[in-house]
Amino acid sequence: MSDLSGTHRGDVFTSAAPVRGGIGMYLLQKMGWKQGEGLGKNNEGQKEPLMLDFKVDRKGLVTEGEGKKPAAKAPVVKDLSGKHPVSALGELCNKRKWGAPRYDMIHESGPSHMRDFLFKVHVNGTDYQPSITSNNKKLAKAQAASVCLQILGLIPRTEMVPNQL
């Protein structure tokens, strides 16, 4: 492909004249840099501009072994075991287009300094609820999300909510 002057499009980048002005040059000079000096506190930096390799074709980015066809991949099941259950459940609902999970407190009891909470989570038309209460709301929500993820088979049933929430 050629432009109006008859030169090849890729040659525009290699035959361009050095930059003699512009905002970058102005800012460097304002900070004390002079033409021909290296960059840095002691002028020990590179004196020549970086040489860039411009991509001028329309083939996309190239990787090693691009000509080879990749082997068939098994379906990937994302590992949710390292994530906070509430985050993992939110991501799952978003990915499957189920709408956001709805957490409802269904039980609260005990004196003000020692409350117990129980939440249920409504996901894709189904309610999931743990069988035990928790001493804080954040943990109770995480337990409800864990029960949902366990029933859906996305985390092992033996795995419980992390202690440090």
Image (cartoon, rainbow, N blue to C red):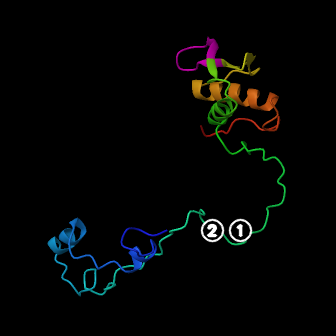
Residue 62 disc label: 2
Q: Residue at x 32, y 84 (%)?
A: 45
Q: Position of residue 132 (x, y in %)?
A: 74, 21
Number of other residues with Cα within 10 Å of mark 1, as a class: few under 14, some 14 to 19, many 20 or more: few
Front residue (pair 71, 118) = 71
Q: Residue at x 52, y 16 (%)?
A: 112
Q: Position of residue 37 (x, y in %)?
A: 24, 86
C-alpha gap between disc 1 and disc 2: 7 Å
Please check the rendered image and state whether residue 134 is part of the magenta-colored stretch, yes or no.
no
For label 1, the SS is: loop
Q: Is residue 3 above or below residue 102?
A: below
Q: Position of residue 15 (x, y in %)?
A: 37, 80
Three-letter amino acid code of the residue under disc 1? Glu
Q: Are marks 1 and 2 in contact (CB under 8 Å)?
A: yes
Front residue (pair 97, 52) = 52
Three-letter amino acid code of the residue under disc 2? Val
For residue 77, which quarter of the picture? top right
Q: Residue at x 74, y 69 (%)?
A: 67
75 relative position to 143: left or right: right
Q: Is residue 44 above or below residue 9?
A: below
Front residue (pair 9, 26) = 9
Residue 66 disc label: 1
132 relative position to 55: left or right: right
Please check the rendered image and state whether residue 111 is part of the magenta-colored stretch, yes or no.
yes
Q: Residue at x 67, y 32 (%)?
A: 89
Residue extent of the magenta highlight:
104-118
- The majority secondary structure of the magenta stretch comes to strand
141 relative position to 160: left or right: left
Q: Position of residue 145 (x, y in %)?
A: 69, 28
